[in-house]
Structures are given as C-alpha cells and as structure tokens.
Amino acid sequence: MVVFIFRRFRGRITSMFLSFGLVEETEIIAVHVKHYKASATMLYSHGNAADLGQMFELFVELSIRLRINIMGYDYSGYGRSSGKPTECNTYADIDAAYKFLKEQYGVKDEQLILYGQSVGSGPTLDLAARISELRGVVLHSPILSGLRVLYPVKRTYWFDIYKNIDKIGSVNCPVLVIHGTADEVVDCSHGKQLSELCKQKFEPLWISGGGHCNLELYPEFIRHLKKFVQTIGKSKAAANGYKKGAVESDSNSKSSESGTSDAFQLGADLPEVSRNSLDSRLEKSKKSNKPDKSRMSTDHVDRFRRRKGLVW
C-alpha cells in the first residue's frame, strides 16, 4: 500500500510530492493498494459522505478478493485534499488520478476498470465517455443526474450537475450496475435506467433490501463483482489473441480458490468489510432529529447555488 500526495494543475499531474505556495494548484490525496498477482487496476471514485480514511479497509478487501490493484482518491475539498468541492473539480481530480496511473504505474486503458459510487458515478462516467478502450465500468448506487435525485424531471436542464443520463451512451466498454432495492437516498430506478441505456450491459445486480451505502455487507455483492472482473478479463484476453493464457489463468484461479488460499473464499463464514455507511448515519439523524451535514450534498444544490451564485 502506498499513499500519495500529488498536485493537480489545470487537470495535469506535475508532481507526486507535497508542494506549497502555488495558488492555482490543488493537492490531491490518493492511496494505491497493490496485489502481487493483479489482473487489472481499478480507479475508485467514492461517494459523497466518505473519504479515504473510511474507504481504506474496503480497498484492501476488494484488492484481495478481486486480485486487482486499486487506486482511490479524495476529491478537492474532501479529506486532506485541498481546493473546493465542485462538479468541475471532481472531473479534474479523476483526470489527474487517471494520468497518474498511466505515467507512474504504466497502466494501460485496457487494464483499467473505473468504479463510481453514488456521486462518484459522475466523474467516473465523464472519464469513461472519453476513453474508448477501457476494460470495464462499475456503477454502484449511481445517479441519473443531481437534479433527478431531488425531482422526477423528464429533461436535462443546463444547471443540472453530473448528467450521467446523457453520458452513459458514450461508454464503449462493459458496464456493471449495482443498486439496492431499498435505497432511500438514490432510488433504484436511477440504476435501472442507466443499465438499460448501456451499449454493453453486463448482468446488473439488484440487491434485495440493500440501502445506499451498505451493499458491501451482502455476500452477492462481492460474488457478482468478482464474476464481472473475471469475465471482462477473459474477454479482453481473447480479443487480444491470448485465449490460451486466459484458459490457463482461469484454471489456476479455480485450483487456487479450492486449494490453499482461504483469503479469496467467498463463504458465509467470512464477514464482508464495509466502511461506515451513510445509512447508519441517516438512522442516527432520524433518532436525534438533526439532519446529517455532508459536503456537496445534492440535497442542498439549489440552496447553495442561490446563496453563492455559482453554476457548476
């Protein structure tokens, strides 16, 4: 595991070291979890009410279970990252993380899986729509757009944010959508509509009774996610003319799962590790009658814009 502090300057990586005194620069904090037999690299964009401190254990667990490298990052204004949390800045942040993976780790587009959770589906789809050779995209409790979380509008307005509904059609790789049927923050209909609009739709996962931020607790979550990672890995290998290598890799994977390594078993005796969920925070807020305060929450978009006079 490596923790990086790198600088984003107009969307470009200039250094992986902490720097001071440059007004136009933003310092982005990122963590890279490396698997010694990684088959792919995942760039994870987390949800609104989270940061790397909360996500770290999940990153480690996913890296072990899926046999992949994972890079997670904090948006501008989140955690220890500097700057302000705006829609445009999240797009610049994911671009910087993507360029960092390519330049420092040599990750190719066909080795990269983009993962976007909740509001993280915004920067994830924005980047995915601009890259033609990605291995895959995972949308976890995604939103159609910021405004559509609040109101059931039928069209996209200029002042809306994270217009995923208009970008999903430009994604040219397999897309997996995961959503809980009991999500009270972002209705499951958002995930279902995005899944229907995909060019290459992988079998979606609708977790019965799942909330907005507790899906990692369900055994079918990691099981289906692993199936997706393995399937697109085989497809990419076959497309590149390495069918024999893919078959051998699958054989080794099966023997390893049934043999010596217990770390990759998906049995019921292994607890699923998750971050502190937003659902639990919502329950606490209901009991105390005090609303949960979260940064850049879509629940406060209209009020924030009117007060600050900002258009994202």
Image: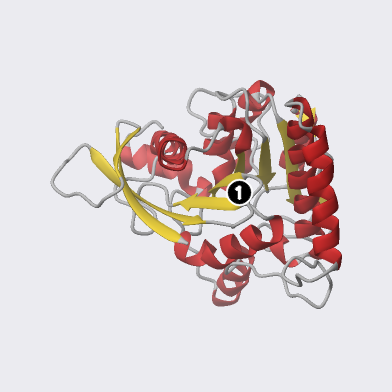
**Residue 15 locus on image (x, y percent):** 28, 42
- Location of residue 307 (image quadrant): top left
Compared with 58, 115 (above or below) is above
Q: Is residue 46 visible?
A: no
**Coordinates of residue 248 in the picture (x, y in percent):** 82, 45
Q: Position of residue 167 (x, y in %)?
A: 61, 25
Which residue in the structure is indicated by mark 1? Answer: 117
Q: Is residue 136 left or right of residue 101?
A: right
- Whether residue 38 is visible to the viewer of this picture, yes or no, is yes
75 relative position to 309: left or right: right
Q: Considering depth in this image, is 214 or 152 the residue closer to the camera?
A: 214
Please identify the quarter of the rendering in which residue 58 is found.
bottom right
What residue is drawn where x is 73% and y is 46%? 229
Position of residue 18 relative to residue 302, above or below, is below
Q: Is residue 171 left or right of residue 220?
A: left
Q: Which residue sits at x=60%, y=66%?
A: 277
Question: Foreground residue, 107 or 309?
Answer: 107
Q: Name the one closer to the observer, 174 or 278.
A: 174
Judging from the image, what secondary structure is the residue with disc 1 in?
strand
